[in-house]
Image (tube, rainbow, N blue to C red):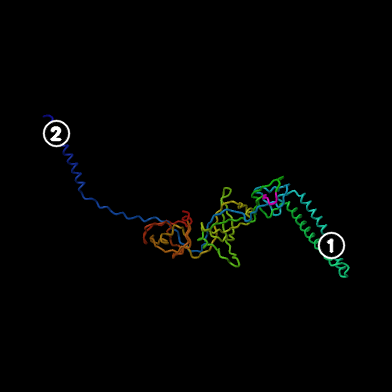
Amino acid sequence: MRLLALLKRYLGPVLIVAGGFLLAIAIIATGPRPDRQARAPEAPSVQTVEAVKRTAQLIVTAHGTVVPKTESSLVAEVAGRVVAVSPSMVSGGFFSQGDVLVEIERIDYEAALQQSRAVLASAESELANAELTFDRAEELATTRAISQADLDTALNQLTVARAAQLQATAALVRAERDLERTRVTAPYDGRVRSEHVDTGQFVSRGEPIATLYSTDYAEVRLPVKDQDLAFLPFSLARIDPPSTVKTKAILRAEFAGSMHAWEAEVVRTEGELDPLSRVVNVIAQVADPYEPEGGAAPLTVGLFVEADIMGNRVEDVVVVPGTALQAGNRLYVVDTNNRLSFRDAEVVRLTAETAYLRVEVSDGERICVTALDDVVEGQSVRPVPVSANTASSR
């Protein structure tokens, strides 16, 4: 009886609380839902640059390795023992035209020269005697004092003496030349790439003793794509007289821990299109590469350089970062109300970073340089002005 009383006392309030909780859940679940408000789309942020029409200098970029204009193998023209080698006759050594680089022992060639002179003197004496004998025989033949056979013999002796004199003269010239060639001289101002001779060594005629290259000009072979030739003042056609059109190039390279630049002159093309790479090599020259002005670094053979070749000039173009050219060769112009206006553009040249365009824009109009997809004309944007240089570097 006591248990029943306790249940009646506590069970009632518990049931009342549970019923209220269930009723609250039912009211929330079946009550009206608030309408969701559609959120207005946010206008995209875009970078812009101001349009400026101008005359632009087209630039074609290429890379190449510096090589000497003239390179040759120095060989011994006479055989003999090397008795002296110039101090500049080492790899990397500089020399001037006419410098004696190697001396070969001369005694045998001096003796050969003296012998040739003696042979020539004997031949000249024999010739003089043969001429006198023939003159006398010719006088006697007019009076029929000697026979025709004797006259013919005198003429034959004269002919043989003349031939011997010519042969002796040629031998003397050869002996003088061989003696001169015992001193191997530099053919031009240059530098030693490698040397293969030392004092006391015996060298044979025609044996290579060094590899030299000139220092009057350095050259760079710059491969240019065939489609980029349209922007350069060159032609692969034969022109009579040859075209004198040349252009400049700026060579850049990192050397001795810092960046350096050299001005070069593009002088010619190799005139042959590579069938595999579809490039044409143009040749840029730098005069006196080892004697730069103003303390600049020398343009060393073997250096890998980047070249900016100055091409044709184009007028009335807008130069913008490449990202400004949108799909369909269009520009997006941001009007005064910050809305997009589409303009069709003619592409004059397009590089990895820059676009040269002809388009109907006015100076000062804002051009969108942010690549956009799925936009419509008249769409609102939030422009952020940037400089053209900053936009190009992104």
Is residue 108 at all visible to an observer of this figure?
A: yes
Which of 91 and 178 lies nearest the eye of the viewer? 178
Left or right of 167: which side holds 187?
left
Considering the image in quadrants, where does the N terminus appear?
top left
Q: Amino acid at mark 1?
A: Ala
Q: Position of residue 15 (x, y in %)?
A: 16, 38
Which of 71 and 263 lies nearest the eye of the viewer? 71
Is residue 319 at all visible to an observer of this figure?
A: no
Which of 240 and 93 lies nearest the eye of the viewer? 240
- State the residue position of label 2: 9
Mark 1 or 2: in front is 1
Location of residue 304 with respect to 53 vertically, above or below:
above
Which region of the structure is painted magenta?
Answer: 204-209
Q: Which element carries disc 1, helix, strand or loop?
A: helix
Label 1 to label 2, Cα distance in Å? Answer: 171 Å
Q: Position of residue 304 (x, y in %)?
A: 56, 52
Instruction: Specify whether residue 208 is painted magenta.
Output: yes
Q: Earlier in the sequence, mark 1 or mark 2?
A: 2
Could you tell me which residue is drawn at 58 percent across and 61 percent down?
A: 268
Q: Residue furthest bottom?
A: 143
- Image quadrant where residue 161 sits: bottom right
Q: Amino acid at mark 2?
A: Arg
Q: Which mark is residue 130?
A: 1
Left or right of 187: which side holds 250?
left
Instruction: Specify whether residue 345 is painted magenta.
Output: no
Location of residue 5 with respect to 388 vertically, above or below:
above
